[in-house]
Amino acid sequence: MFAPAIFLLISGCSSNYRGVECQGEIKSLAGRPLGSTSAMIMDRYNSFTVTMPQEKAKVESGMLHSTDRTLYIPSAVTTEGFLAQRVSDKKFAIIDSRQDKWITYTCPK
């Protein structure tokens, strides 16, 4: 009786989940549209990974922090110096102030 539940739990944790393809909107920090992109996003709730094949880059958010998730967007500064934000269950942002870029990725449900 418990064996199927345990098997599903273990297989879910060890799956080869590579993420979901999400569409990105690129803007300047002032909000001027700069184009679009796409990326694979692996969401782990307290962190996420963005793999950008066009730029041949991968960004790890690191542990996202928020003093109150109902009031503040969970965010972290990556090792590359980007601000990574988990805006919602299906929306993520990477902000690069040095290049005046703000990419917001929207993922399908």
Image: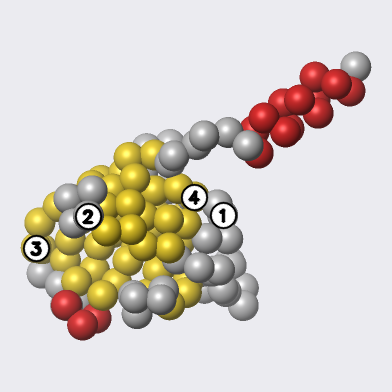
Separation (CA) of disc 2 from disc 1: 24 Å
Q: Secondary structure at mark 3?
A: strand
Viewed as shown, does residue 86 lie left or right of 45? left
Q: Residue at x 44, y 39 (%)?
A: 18
Extreme-right residue of the structure: 1
Closest to the camera, between mark 2 and mark 1, is 2
Separation (CA) of disc 2 from disc 4: 19 Å
| Residue type for callout 1 | Tyr
Instruction: Point out the tag, 2 or 4, that comes first from the N-terminus.
Output: 4
Q: Which mark is residue 34?
A: 3
Categorize mark 3 by other alpha carbons within 10 Å: few (<14), some (14-19), many (20+).
few
**Residue on which disc 1 sits:** 45
Residue 63, by quadrant, is bottom right
Residue 99 at x, y percent in the picture: 16, 77
Residue 13 at x, y percent in the picture: 65, 39
Q: Quadrant of the C terminus?
A: top left
Instruction: Point out the tag, 2 or 3, that comes first from the N-terminus.
Output: 3
| Residue type for callout 4 | Asp
Categorize mark 1 by other alpha carbons within 10 Å: few (<14), some (14-19), many (20+).
few
Q: Quadrant of the N terminus?
A: top right
